[in-house]
């Protein structure tokens, strides 16, 4: 799993344009899990997973 960001800033430093990618390998990964043993929950296992491939872009102007 890896992330990558590319950001361009103007020479006057008032414009910034960026593209960011997270989990570029698109891997499924678990961030947490719970095991609920016993009769009440029927041996339940619950897992929480992180976000898959995500790409965002931004344009910023500072004045």
Image (cartoon, helix red, strand yellow):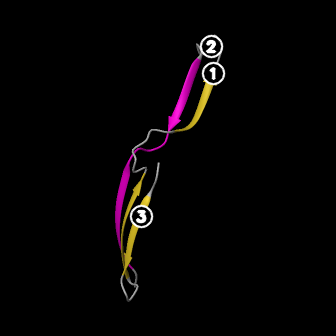
Dot 3 corresponds to which residue? 5
Mark 3 vs mark 2, CA separation in Å: 47 Å
Residue beneath the point at 37% across and 88% down: 11
Q: Which residues are magenta?
A: 44-61
Mark 1 vs mark 2, CA separation in Å: 9 Å
The crowd level at tag 2 (other Cα within 10 Å; few <14, some 14-19, many 20+) is: few
Q: Element at badge 2? A: loop
Q: Element at badge 3? A: strand
Dot 1 corresponds to which residue? 36
Front label number (3 vs 1): 3
Labels 3 and 2 touching (C-beta < 8 A) = no
Which mark is first along the chain, 1 or 3? 3
- Residues 2 and 63: in front is 2
Dot 2 corresponds to which residue? 40
User: Residue 48 lies in magenta, yes or no?
Assistant: yes
Residue beneath the point at 57% across and 19% down: 44
Q: Residue furthest bottom?
A: 12
User: Residue 15 appears at what percent x and percent y?
Assistant: 36, 80
- Residues 50 and 27: in front is 27
User: Residue 58 lies in magenta, yes or no?
Assistant: yes
User: Residue 47 appears at what percent x and percent y?
Assistant: 53, 31
Residue beneath the point at 43% across and 49% down: 23
Q: Element at badge 1? A: strand
Q: Is residue 16 left or right of residue 45?
A: left
Residue beneath the point at 52% across and 35% down: 48
């Amino acid at each position: 799993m890896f992330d990558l960001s590319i950001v361009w800033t103007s020479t006057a430093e008032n414009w910034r344009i960026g593209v960011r990618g997270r989990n570029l390998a698109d891997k499924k990964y678990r961030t947490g899990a719970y095991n609920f043993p016993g009769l009440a929950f029927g041996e339940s296992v619950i897992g929480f997973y992180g976000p898959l491939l995500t790409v965002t872009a931004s344009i910023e102007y500072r004045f």
